[in-house]
């Protein structure tokens, strides 16, 4: 499918690179772009992608919601969340393949939430994360109030959301918000290598891992153990598991097919 505001490219290694492509607005998120992001993300596995790499074109990842798009201020901002932002976040969490975010500059507002929804986030040294909603009298959205306390802890999340100050990439790494930081000139290469490593892995198991990690945050220990039992049954029935056991016995590296 052809897209106007995003690009979807599948590499020979089965990495789907999904690029936010409104660089003239610092990849500000409007309804059309949010819809395309969701469609492209959901399309990727059907095109053979085994990992999704999310990044932004130009000087930044995303400046957040497009406040300069015209049409005036809506009476119900929550309706826009329900119609566009929330379905995208839900779609990303529901994907059966791992997601890597390469944050190449500012990730602000809903753009910050979008980046942090990935399984592994790698940011350029010059990148920063910002929840600026409080500066205009709003609350963090697109999953920020759910994500940030779980990633950074309540105290740091509250500081970030209530003060509306920039969190540089190095600080975000130290806070546990992101996994890695790269030098600006190395971000593209390092994020592509990471996404390729995941795409060549046992992606059926990786999909189960991302689902378990998400769901476990809402479960009691007994329920989490039960969920692991079911997922391990499913993982143990994959061709990847059987082939990896044979490779181990034959003292060779396994080749995973994602099934």
Image: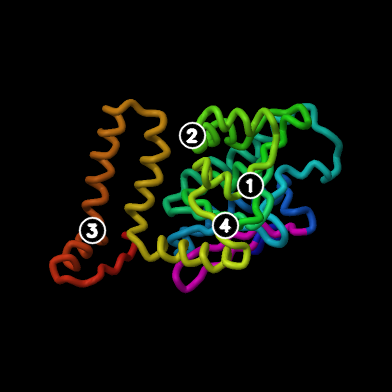
Q: Residues within 10 Å of mark 4 (few under 14, many from 20)?
A: many
Would residue 18 be found to the left or right of residue 194 on screen?
A: right
- Whether tag 1 and tag 3 are in contact, CB under 8 A, the answer is no
The C terminus: image quadrant: bottom left
First-in-chain label (2 vs 4): 4
Q: Which type of secondary structure does the marked residue at label 3 adopt? A: helix
Q: Residue 18 carries which label?
A: none
Magenta-drawn segment = 7-23
- Label 1, label 4: how many angstroms apart (C-alpha)? 15 Å
Return the x and y of residue 43 as percentages of the image width and height.
53, 57
Sequence-earlier tag: 4 or 3 = 4
Q: Mark 4 points at which residue?
A: 102
Tell me the CA gap for discs 2 and 3. 31 Å
Q: Quadrant of residue 1?
A: bottom right
Residue 136: % across, % down: 78, 31
Q: In this view, does 190 lie to the left or right of 110?
A: left
1 vs 3, front mark: 1
Q: Which of the 4 quarters of the picture holds residue 89? A: top right
Mark 2 vs 3, N-terminal side: 2
Q: Mark 3 points at which residue?
A: 241
**Left or right of residue 214, residue 144 in this image:** right
Residue with the mark numbered 1? 168
Q: In this view, does 44 lie above or below 163?
A: below
Question: Do labels 1 and 4 touch, CB within 8 Å?
Answer: no
For disc 2, the marked residue is: 150
Q: How crowded is mark 1: few (under 14 residues within 10 Å), some or many (20 or more)?
A: some
How many angstroms separate mark 2 from mark 4 (CA)?
Answer: 20 Å
Q: Assign a secondary structure to mark 2.
A: helix
Q: Nearer the viewer, mark 1 or mark 2?
A: 1
């Amino acid at each position: 499918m052809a897209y106007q505001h995003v690009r979807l490219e599948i590499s020979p290694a089965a990495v789907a690179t999904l690029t936010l492509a409104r660089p003239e607005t610092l990849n500000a998120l409007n309804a059309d772009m949010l819809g395309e992001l969701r469609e492209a993300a959901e399309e990727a596995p059907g095109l053979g992608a085994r990992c999704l790499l999310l990044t932004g074109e130009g000087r930044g990842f995303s400046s957040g919601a497009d406040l300069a798009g015209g049409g005036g201020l809506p009476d119900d901002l929550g309706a826009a969340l329900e119609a566009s932002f929330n379905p995208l976040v839900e779609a990303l969490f529901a994907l059966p393949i791992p997601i890597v975010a390469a944050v190449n500059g500012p990730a602000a507002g809903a753009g910050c939430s979008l980046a942090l929804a990935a399984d592994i986030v790698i940011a350029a040294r010059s990148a920063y994360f910002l929840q600026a909603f409080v500066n205009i009298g709003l609350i963090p959205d697109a999953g920020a109030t759910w994500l940030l306390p779980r990633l950074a802890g309540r105290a740091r999340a509250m500081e970030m959301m209530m003060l509306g100050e920039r969190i540089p990439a190095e600080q975000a790494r130290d806070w546990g918000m992101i996994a890695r930081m790269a030098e600006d000139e190395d971000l593209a290469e390092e994020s592509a290598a990471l996404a390729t490593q995941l795409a060549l892995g046992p992606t059926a198991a990786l999909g189960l891992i991302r689902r378990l990690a998400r769901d476990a945050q809402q479960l009691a220990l007994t329920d989490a153990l039960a969920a692991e039992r079911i997922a391990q049954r499913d993982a143990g029935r994959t061709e990847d598991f059987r082939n990896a056991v044979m490779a181990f016995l034959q003292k060779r590296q396994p080749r995973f097919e994602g099934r």
